[in-house]
Image (cartoon, rainbow, N blue to C red):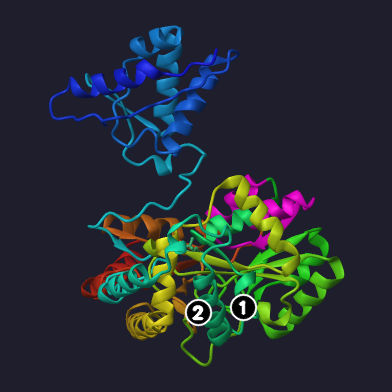
Amino acid sequence: MAQVLGHCAADFLGNSCHHAGVSGIPGLDLHLELAAARPAQALSAALRSAIVAGRLAPRTRLPAARALAADLGLSRNTVAAVYAQLAAEGWLQPRVGAGTWVSDDTAAAGTVRRPRRPAAAPHLIDLRGGVPDVTGFPRGEWLAAVRAATMHAPAAEFGYGDPAGSLRLRAALAGYLARTRGVAAQPEGVVVGSGFGELLVLVCRALRARGARRLAVEAYGHRRHRRLIAATGLEPVPIPVDGDGADVTMLEGADADAVLLTPAHQFPLGVPLAAERRRWLVAWARRRDALVLEDDYDGEFRYDRRAVGALQALAPDRVVYLGTASKAVAPSVGLAWAAPPAGLRAEVLDQRELGGGAPAGLQQLALAAFIEAHEYDRSVRRLRVRYRERLARLEQTVARDLPGCALTGLAAGLQCLLRLPPGDDERRIERAARRRGVLLEGLAAFRADGFAGRAGPALVIGYGAPPPGRYDTALSLLVESIRAA
Ligand SMILES: Cc1ncc(COP(=O)(O)O)c(C=O)c1O
């Protein structure tokens, strides 16, 4: 039975609207596709995936079991049992006399996790790793870049663009990356994307099309990136990380065709990949005819000495360099770039043709003008000063108020690691912080599923996101949460 709930969508709306003080979601269009066999499991899976995908938002009222049963041609008891099961798992909330609702906090429900880190609600203080400070976004300078780019671009720039991205932006990026990160790339070799994730997917699909099967990843890293990799058909294989970055010697036994690393500043441990490991890695890649995907997400933010150069410079034929404007300017710029080895470029662009186009041309032109006017450099410098100052305040706080805790990974970036005394419970601290309105993540939240090693207890402290006026409050609440847990 393949059911598309066209009129049930209206039912969802209607049910919501009958209740005073509860508004429906205008235009909600919920499709549930149910397999003929085992309709209860199919309904339960369809509701779960609609919640995970956000098609059923928190606090949406579901139709009465009887109404949904009639729509789907199921018995009322089947639907009621599914509702009860999903309520027990935390996805749904039955309210006495007021029907069944999607839970407020579906992230904690069941075994399926929310796929995306939600943006923090404005009243919450965000101390999660990797979230940049956007309060100082250079509005005037960006506007000037948009204006200059729009006024002076040749008419051809307003047409269908090059699938690799605007050549003007690629030239600006090639120059910037060579100057600041030592990246060896010609403008023709750069591919512009709408975010690191998009480019990661294109590269993974290109590798998969070549026959690659396994992509090694750092055992601690972004859950979303591992999910993206798996969704392309490659198997993410975790390798351990320690104080010298990823233990790349473990690649030997990992049977991997490629590896994704954060060499400049391991995310989230915060350490650079040691020099001898870099050399070992390049030798491995050549020996095995493998590729290294270098995620250089915050390579410009180095506080102790000159920036650790990009790994790509050691082996442009083996390394796919990947960077983003999200940390150096702001995530809403929505642009990232890749410099793949020449032999992979056409395959990456082929995947782009299959999956969509280059990001909006006008946005690319604006970023090109922004870089050409050296505003990108200025943005990095401004943020670097701000982050370094925040880091110093965090260090003072920990030294003064948190005996037994230690900070590591301090030399770069916009997050570091707060090591907790043995026996401290990351999850309890996360919950204590949440009760105080602070979003915080323990190190375990970044561990790859199935990876046996344990690196905690520790908290990943992102010092970028809290607005300047709330940073001291954020630190006091951090201390309070650790003491209370
Ligand atoms: C380690 C790491 N890589 C890549 C990115 C992603 O960059 P983008 O914003 O372009 O998706 C992030 C952003 O949080 C990150 O923390």
Near-viewer residue (294 or 125): 294
Asked whether residue 114 is in view, the answer is yes
Judged left or right of residue 207, residue 416 is: left
Are there few (<14), some (14-19), or many (20+) residues within 10 Å of tag 2? some
Residue type at the position of mark 1: Gly
Query: Assess mark 2: CB under 8 A from ligand 1?
Result: no
Q: Which x, y percent locates residue 215? A: 71, 57
Whether residues under marks 1 and 2 lie with C-beta atoms below 8 angstroms apart, the answer is: yes
Q: Which x, y percent locates residue 83? A: 40, 21
Q: Looking at the picture, does residue 449 appear above or below residue 3?
A: below
Dot 1 or dot 2: first in sequence order is 1
- Give the extent of the magenta segment: 203-232
Judged left or right of residue 471, residue 33 is: right
**What is the secondary structure assignment of the residue under circle 1?**
loop
Are there few (<14), some (14-19), or many (20+) residues within 10 Å of tag 1? some
Q: Looking at the picture, does residue 68 appear above or below residue 401?
A: above
Judged left or right of residue 283, residue 432 is: left
The disc at residue 243 is 1
Asked whether residue 334 is in view, the answer is no
Question: Does the segment drawn in magenta span residue 475?
Answer: no
Q: Residue at x 64, y 56 (%)?
A: 349
Residue sticking out furthest to the front: 155
Residue type at the position of mark 2: Thr
The disc at residue 408 is 2
Question: Does the segment drawn in magenta span residue 229?
Answer: yes
Q: Which x, y percent locates residue 47? A: 44, 27
Q: Residue at x 74, y 78 (%)?
A: 315
Judged left or right of residue 79, residue 348 is: right
